[in-house]
Image (spheres, rainbow, N blue to C red):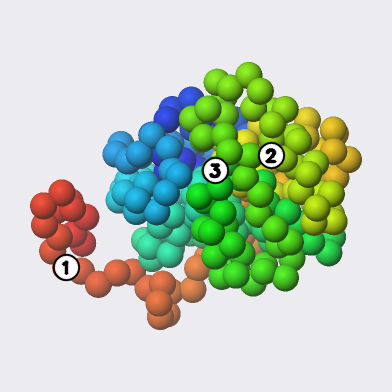
Amino acid sequence: MLIKVVNPNTTQSMTDKIGDCARSVAGPGTLVEAVSPKMGPASIESHYDEALSVPGILDEIARGEEAGVDGYVIACFGDPGLDAARELASGPVLGIAEAAMHAASFLGRGFSVVTTLGRTRGRAWELAERYGMHRFCLDVHACEIAVLDLDSDPDAVKVITEACRAALTQDGSDAIVLGCAGMADLCAVLSADLGVPVVDGVAAATLMVQSLVTLGLRTGARGEFAPPLPKAYTGLLEGFGR
């Protein structure tokens, strides 16, 4: 089985981290390919960034289809391009926010999301409602660390830990969902420190895609998620015509 994990931003160090986290949970016989698109933003922290990341994501999905990929993970907590990717892919596609929220809903009455910048909180709430997780998501908290500073800020782990601790106290939640793929390597240390389940969407989505492929399941393609109608695209999108 081959699972392709697409980091929608172009920062290779983050892609390497995401790939390591996905491989750490993949089962025997499952290969994980982690990639960054050839075009797109260095990080995704706004609607603008998210919109401009989608062509690169879809290009990687198309490449994966040519290479015989069995399933895909979109490794950004905004789940950018998820619906469009499902139209292109022959196997299942999961976003990490979708996977993490569902996983956390199995672990207690409610969870708190701890993300990067406050400006992304609205998107997390929007996704919680879309995925039917609004009643489980007790609140969304920001640690106000930019995505690209997660690895370089020496205080990042401390700040994230305290944001998680405050969320647990304020919300009375049973679990924490990490709201950024760049936090994927922090689950074990945070869970040990906080004493509650901490869910990383990269790991959760990888295992869920693996399970769906094993079950022989994929996105239904009778209606909305049927392959897109063929038509010409122009300008920078010329190569996306089908």
Label 2 to label 1: alpha-carbon separation: 40 Å
Label 3 to label 2: alpha-carbon separation: 28 Å
Q: Nearer the viewer, mark 3 or mark 2?
A: 3
Q: Quadrant of the C terminus?
A: bottom left
Q: Residue furthest left?
A: 235
Q: Position of residue 41 (x, y in %)?
A: 35, 39
Can you see residue 213? Answer: no
Amino acid found under the numbered disc labelled 2 = Val
Residue tagged 3: 117
Residues packed near mark 2 inside 10 Å, few (<14), some (14 to 19) or many (20 plus)? some
- Circle 1: element type: loop
238 to the left or right of 182: left
Q: Position of residue 191 (x, y in %)?
A: 81, 38
Q: Nearer the viewer, mark 3 or mark 1?
A: 3
Is mark 2 in CB contact (under 8 Å) with mark 1?
no
Amino acid found under the numbered disc labelled 1 = Lys
Q: Residue at x 31, y 49 (%)?
A: 52
Residue tagged 2: 25
69 to the left or right of 214: left
Work out whether residue 171 or residue 97 is closer to the camera in this orientation and state it: 171
Q: Earlier in the sequence, mark 3 or mark 1?
A: 3
Residue tagged 1: 231
Q: Position of residue 116 (x, y in %)?
A: 57, 41
